[in-house]
Image (tube, helix red, strand yellow):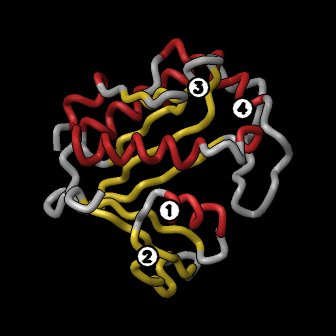
Amino acid sequence: MKANLYHQLKRESERLVVRPYLFNDFALCKSSREARLEQQNQFDSPVNISNSWDKTQFKNKVMAHREKAKSKTQFIFGVFDKREELFLGQVDLFTISSVLKWGNLGYNIHNQFWGKGYAKEASEICLKIAFEDLGFHRVEAAMDIENLASEKVAQKLGLDFEGVRKKFLPDELQDMKVYATNHKDF
C-alpha cells in the first residue's frame, strides 16, 4: 500500500472534503465537538468535552495519525463540509492484513449532523481512497448486530452482506454483522 502518500490524500464530493487532519484544524474540530447533542443512542459515542483538550493534545493526535499511516496500520481522515467549513466527523481504514490488502472501514459523524447522508458520502470517498490511492483489495465494514444506522450506511454504499461473526470481540463476546466489497466490484 502506498502509505507514503497519506499526507497528500484529499478527495472531494460536491459537499465534502475528506483528508488527513492538519494542525490548523484544531478550532474547527473543537467547535464541532462542543456543538454535539446529548448522546442519542448506545452507538453514539459520547465525546468528553473538557477545558484540558488543547492544541497540544490535538497536534499529538494528528502526529499519531501520521505515524499510523506511515506504519500502514490505520489511515484516519477528517470529514469537512466544504461550503460551510464545518468539521463533520471522521472516516478511517484499519489494515486487517497488509499481505491480503484487506481493511476495515469505520465511519463516525457527529450527531448534530446525522440524517443528511454524510456518513454514506464520506465513506464512499474513503473507499475510493482505499482502492485507488492506497491499493487495498478488500474493505469490510463490521458493526454491532443491533446498530441499524451503521448497517444502513453499509447497505447504501452497496456493500455485500457476508454474515455474522459470532462472539467476535474477545472482551465483550460481541456478535458483528459484516458487509464488504473489493476493488473490482466497488
Image coordinates for residue 147, horizontal then vertical, percent: 65, 69
Distance of label 2 from label 4 (alpha carbons): 32 Å
The label on residue 81 is: 3
Location of the C terminus by quadrant is: bottom left
Cα separation, mark 3 vs mark 4, equals 15 Å
Q: CA distance from mark 2 to mark 1?
A: 9 Å
Is residue 97 left or right of 165 when viewed as pictured?
Answer: left
Q: 32 or 170: which is nearer to us?
A: 32
Earlier residue among tags 2 and 4: 4
Q: Which secondary structure, mark 2?
A: strand
Circles 2 and 1: CB atoms closer than 8 Å:
yes
Residue at screen point 31% across, 58% down = 103
Out of 93 and 65, give the one closest to the viewer.
93
Dividing the picture into quarters, in which one does residue 172 lie? bottom right
Residue type beneath disc 3: Asp
Which mark is first along the chain, 4 or 1? 4
Three-letter amino acid code at the position of disc 4: Arg
Q: Is residue 1 above or below residue 163?
A: above
Q: Residue furthest right?
A: 38
Q: Residue shown at 42%/46% (left/top)?
A: 124
Q: Amino acid type of disc 1?
A: Ala
| Disc 2 target residue | 161
- SS class of the residue under badge 4? helix
Residue 154's label in the rendered image is 1
Q: Is residue 38 above or below residue 34?
A: below
Q: Which residue is mark 4?
A: 33
Mark positioned earlier in the residue sequence (3 or 1): 3
Instruction: Tell me which numbered mark, 3 or 4, is placed earlier along the sequence.
Output: 4
Q: How would you rate the neighbour count of disc 2 (Cα within 10 Å): few for under 14, some for 14-19, many for 20 or more?
A: some
